Amino acid sequence: MMNTTIQDVTTPAKPEPSGPVQPAQPMQLGIDSFATAFTHDAAGSAANPSEAIRHLVDRIVQAEQAGLDVFGIGEHHRKEFLDSAPPVILAAAATRTKRIRLTSAVTVLSAADPVRVFQEFATLDLLTQGRAEMVVGRGSFIESFPLFGLDLEDYDSLFAEKLELLLKIRENEHVHWKGKHRAALTGQGVYPRPFQNPLPVWLGVGGTPHSFARAGALGLPLMVAIIGGETRRFRPLVEGYRQMGRRAGFTAEQLKVGVHALGYVADTTEQAVEEFYPGYARAFTEVGKERGWPPVTRAQFDALLGRHGALLVGSPERVAEKILEHSEALGGLSRISFQMDVAALPHAKLMHAIELLGTRVAPLIRAAAKG
């Protein structure tokens, strides 16, 4: 590969014009879940944690039956989420599915041991005969740092070092490596080895240019979390990623771009909006209290429903149209994953939304790709 540094395109003056990048394969559609502990059942009663996590596995099975391509489980260490151990949930789903790809969304690599992370997902990959993936990132919450005895001042260096080690393990059965934050490896074997070679690793990013550039320099597929604002504003960052990847010698097929988006599908757009908004507003208002954001307003929500807004909420036809607009805005997408449980919707409504996404939205996307 060419000797290209991340700094070369960390703040690109002007991305190279490239036009839409057509993925080698049709766009994949999937679901991401944070295993919310505040999900309600069909009668409106709060589900207990055991019921909530069992319902989540049911939704993964539903996603496969509806024809979706991938299901991801996030990682948090907070009371309102049940996803502190994503590989365990994914393994439970693996025993009940045969086709759908199972991934993290994201693995908080800064707070984890890359050896253990690789072992867990390699085991999942063997269990599923090659359906495991991971999306690794730094996460948007910081509870894991004090929980695991880490210093928040090492936020950036922890992730960079652990990503380097994870990729080293992926490439080598016996690893020679030395870093600052972990004991050195002097040729130890890391087992088991996965079914896939290599085990797919995506880099999950928010809005930091350096993170996009790092993914391109390493040739890693990119998963962009776009949960607010206008999707098109991420185009320069995505182009910077592609530009870096091309300079480093990677192909367009290797430089995949996916989007993690908040969304919800119902039979009509009016129904989807009215069902999704209350829980969405509560969740983001609560998070906002921690981060100094003002309370969510309906006007802000409605703006995000517009053509350029990030939210994918509506009827199957409207959501399909919006997905295609997202893809065009970013120069072509390989994958888009819906995060629907942020709104604390009843399990039955989420099951119906997954059915609509697989049986109504996905065919429209595939038809557009052929046409």
Image (cartoon, rainbow, N blue to C red):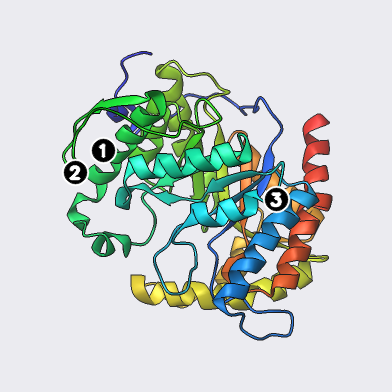
- Secondary structure at badge 1 equals helix
Q: Position of residue 155 (x, y in %)?
A: 25, 51
Q: Position of residue 20 (x, y in %)?
A: 62, 29
Pointer 2 with pointer 1, Cβ within 8 A: yes
Q: Residues within 10 Å of mark 1 (few under 14, many from 20)?
A: some
Establish if 295 lies above or below 335. Answer: below
Residue carrying label 1 = 161
Q: Depth check: give the residue in front, 112 or 324.
A: 112
Pointer 2 with pointer 3, Cβ within 8 A: no
Amino acid type shown at disc 3: Lys
Q: Residues within 10 Å of mark 2 (few under 14, many from 20)?
A: few
- Secondary structure at badge 3 equals helix
288 to the left or right of 30 = left
Residue drawn at (79%, 61%), measured in percent from left and top? 315
Q: Can residue 152 be seen in this view?
A: yes
* Total numbered badges shown on the rendered structure: 3
Q: Is residue 226 visible?
A: no
Amino acid type shown at disc 1: Glu
Residue carrying label 2 = 181
- Please give the label number shown on residue 281: none
Residue carrying label 3 = 322
59 to the left or right of 215 = right
The earlier-in-sequence mark between 2 and 1 is 1
